[in-house]
Amino acid sequence: MDIGKHLSDNMNRPRCPGLQFNDLASLAAGVKSLVYTSVRGAGDARLLDRLCADLKLKKVDLGNNKNVGNVPITCVLIGRSAKKLEAAKKAYRNVLSLEWGIALDYPECCVRSYIEWNLRRGNEDLIRHIYARSPAGTTFPFWMNNVFNYYSRLIRPEDRLKYAAFSKLNQGMDRESIIPWHPCSYLCAETVKKGKLIYDVMKRYMPLTAASRKTMLSKPIVFWDKFLFAILNGRCRTMDGGFIIAYKGLGGPKSLIGRETEKILSGRKTLRVRRGEITAPAGLRLPGNHIVIPFAHRDIRFPAQHQDFEKARVGGPAGKDNKMLSDNILSYPARGFLQHLAGVERSDTIQLYPTGGGRNLFLPQTPSCPKVTPPEERLKDKG
Ligand SMILES: [Zn+2]
């Protein structure tokens, strides 16, 4: 059995559209042991059953059939452990509980932060809540970017309408994030680590999709609100406690900002940013209260003790060679899952690290369809 059959750049194969790639990659990375998803109609249900059979996963129906846009949706959990699935089913009674977030294997700090934001029910978007809890003067790794992830973020009545307009404007674009949850901070240690593992699995099994997401997510963003932002088509680097951003025009996805604002920011520019505000060029006047979120194209070099930990944990080349975690694609949890897929019990019987020109046991097939078409509109509503 090959997870590459379900996690690949070939977007034309039949797949259950409710199941996000990042959730599936989280399973393969060992970051998550179960996934909350949804099926629409009998066709989707058959596809999900086939996936579960292929990957030796169990499925639990949450018995919460609802209609989204007049289409019946069934919410389900899929995972390896029947015990964990049952515990998660119980926690599902309150989707705004610590138990539910933890059952989904989200970092506790992030679940607590999300609940705090949600209970406040103010007008502040979750992105500003996260930004306010993030350290200043440093860039954020692209896999932490959740600006286009609207699950569990549409709170106000008008949000749904705006979301429809936003979706129409960006129809056909893959806007899925790398991390399937909202972080507590853009440098949350646990999410930074887990997000990288998810990205590495994506890069391995769906390299074109991973590359396109990296491009989309690694740009600095001028952010006003949920559907009001501008992606600066360029790079951000730290300088004198602030940032310098060199960019050319605006990137996608498009937001609902007005033409005038777009005009101010378009063209080729170099901006200086301090404490989230644009300080140069002096003539650049943007309307309203905005922040600049410095997402960037960077890898994290983990401190030495982390590498020792990795070495002890996997005994692989990543620890030995003092490389970045990104080189250590199949870390222990992933190995556990891949063994599970292969039905291999003994950890020393399969080769997990690509050596020389050799092929890994689980290397994906070469994508037969290099054209990346976006996944269908996601159906899940994480409440
Ligand atoms: Zn966190």
Image (cartoon, rainbow, N blue to C red):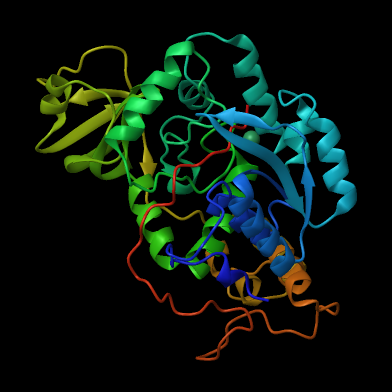
Between 267 and 379, the residue placed more toward the observer is 379
Horizontally, residue 213 falls left or right of residue 46, namely left
Quarter residue 238 falls in: top left
Task: Name the residue: 43% across, 62% down.
Answer: 11
Q: How many marks?
A: 0
Between 315 and 172, the residue placed more toward the observer is 172
Horizontally, residue 382 falls left or right of residue 297, namely right
Between 41 and 227, the residue placed more toward the observer is 41
In the current view of this chain or complex, which residue is farthest to the bottom?
A: 357
- Residue 339: % across, % down: 76, 73
- Residue 153 in sight from this viewpoint: yes
- Residue 281 in sight from this viewpoint: no
Where 227 falls versus 321 (above or below)? Answer: above
- Quarter of the image where the N terminus is located: bottom right
Task: Name the residue: 61% across, 43% down.
Answer: 191
- Residue 68: % across, % down: 55, 30
In the current view of this chain or complex, which residue is farthest to the right?
A: 83
Task: Name the residue: 90% across, 49% down.
Answer: 83
Where 183 falls versus 287 (above or below)? Answer: below
User: Where ligand 1 lies, by quadrant?
Assistant: top right
Task: Name the residue: 44% across, 79% down.
Answer: 366
- Residue 255: % across, % down: 29, 29
Horizontally, residue 221 falls left or right of residue 269, namely right
- Residue 56: % across, % down: 77, 66
Horizontally, residue 159 falls left or right of residue 319, namely left
Between 100 and 224, the residue placed more toward the observer is 100
- Quarter of the image where the C terminus is located: top right
